Amino acid sequence: ADIPGRSWPWSGRGRAVRLDRRAAMLPNAPPDQVERWNSVPQDSTWYSVQAPLYAADDPFEGPSAWPNLANGSKEWKVCMTAPATSFASLVRAFGVEPHCSICTGSSASSAFDTHTTSPQHFRVVCDAVESQYELAREDLWHETIVVGGRMRYNHLDGEIQVLREVPDESVHDGVLALQTLPEEGVWLLGGGPSCVAMSPAGLRQHWPNLWSMRNWKEKMDRPTNRLSEVLQANGDINGCQCFLCPNKAVTPDHILGKKHFGELANRVPDGAVMRLEDFWQTWTFATGAVAFNHVDGTIRLVKRPACAEASATTAAAAAPQAPAQAAACSSSKASAGQARAAVAVAAQDAPP
């Protein structure tokens, strides 16, 4: 998605540098799962954190050749409970409940370790092996996306793999005042996403923070409080209105409340693709601007260049005097047209 307001005369893209996304795990994530995740290099490569537990005695014999399939669903449960629980525990450390990708029906969306050891799931795996033999293994991977990487589980042999993405940006999470940003005229990351769609399809139901009010508060508490600190440091947060909820300030109490959650959920029905670019909002200050994504919690900051300030001052001095209007900040949904109107700065004075 486009960085909000990048069409502003004085805005550009940040440099590709490193970003630590450990914050995506829950604050109370079990230490063993934190250590497990951190043990994997951040190089966008799949690593096996649990080797395959089972293999076929004869790759052309179907289910009867697999020790975990040959003796029925009860033995299947005994064999697969440990690897399924191991995978689910790692994913749950991110506040995500994986849903089975090879089964249909309501049971597929129940607890992952309960469903994948059930007779219903056992029959689906057996049918796949019966028709494809050992080749079924490659079709029996389940993958879940989390902030900063992906995890996958093999339904046939219990292998677990983890991929941690190469970080591409530094997060300036210690910056409050916009004038203290290290670069001018460049959108920098003030807070990384707190949630991502757990499936590439990106449908509304794939966003864990939209599953319930509990999930919403759990995921959005960190970015919401960070946003509040930044807005308050650059103006008055009570003057920064929410574009989803008219006449409501973007305080933590509002964003984490039922009204805001309901308004957001109502805009995208189940089965629809969640378009992140539709949910950016930008607030403009004398020293720069703050942008917030109402879906994934990403925060971006930009410092107004000195040349832009000079141009704005010159233009203001030559312009007819208008009635004074006090405002802590101006707010806009981050579309190209609105962003251009948000700041009156001469394009010829802007950095490339």
Image (cartoon, rainbow, N blue to C red):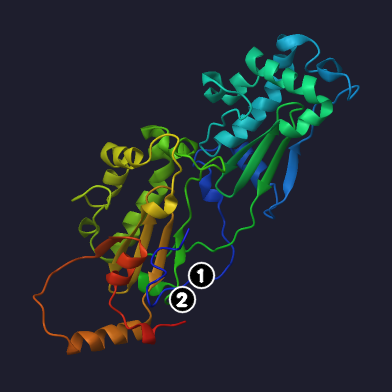
Identify which residue is drawn at 46% across, 76% down.
183
Q: How many marks?
A: 2
Instruction: Answer with left or right where residue 28 lies relative to residue 249.
Output: right
Instruction: Answer with left or right where residue 45 lies relative to residue 328.
Output: right
**Depth order, front residue of 82/102:** 102
Furthest residue in direction right, as rendered: 58
Pick whichever of labels 2 and 1 is earlier in the sequence: 1
Q: Residues within 10 Å of mark 1 (few under 14, many from 20)?
A: some
Q: Hey, what amino acid is under mark 2? A: Glu
Q: Residues within 10 Å of mark 2 (few under 14, many from 20)?
A: some
Q: Position of residue 83 (x, y in %)?
A: 70, 27
Q: Which residue is mark 1?
A: 14
Secondary element type, mark 1:
loop
Q: Mark 2 touching mark 1, by CB under 8 A?
A: yes
Identify which residue is drawn at 53% across, 43% down.
25
Q: Which residue is mark 2?
A: 183
- Label 2 or label 1, whichever lies nearer to me, is 1
**Depth order, front residue of 120/211:** 120
Instruction: Answer with left or right where residue 65 lies relative to residue 145.
Output: right
**Depth order, front residue of 122/217:** 122
Residue 66 visible? The answer is: no
Secondary element type, mark 2:
loop
Q: Hey, what amino acid is under mark 1? A: Gly
The correct choice, above or below, for 283 with respect to 246 in the image is below
Identify which residue is drawn at 83% across, 19% down.
62
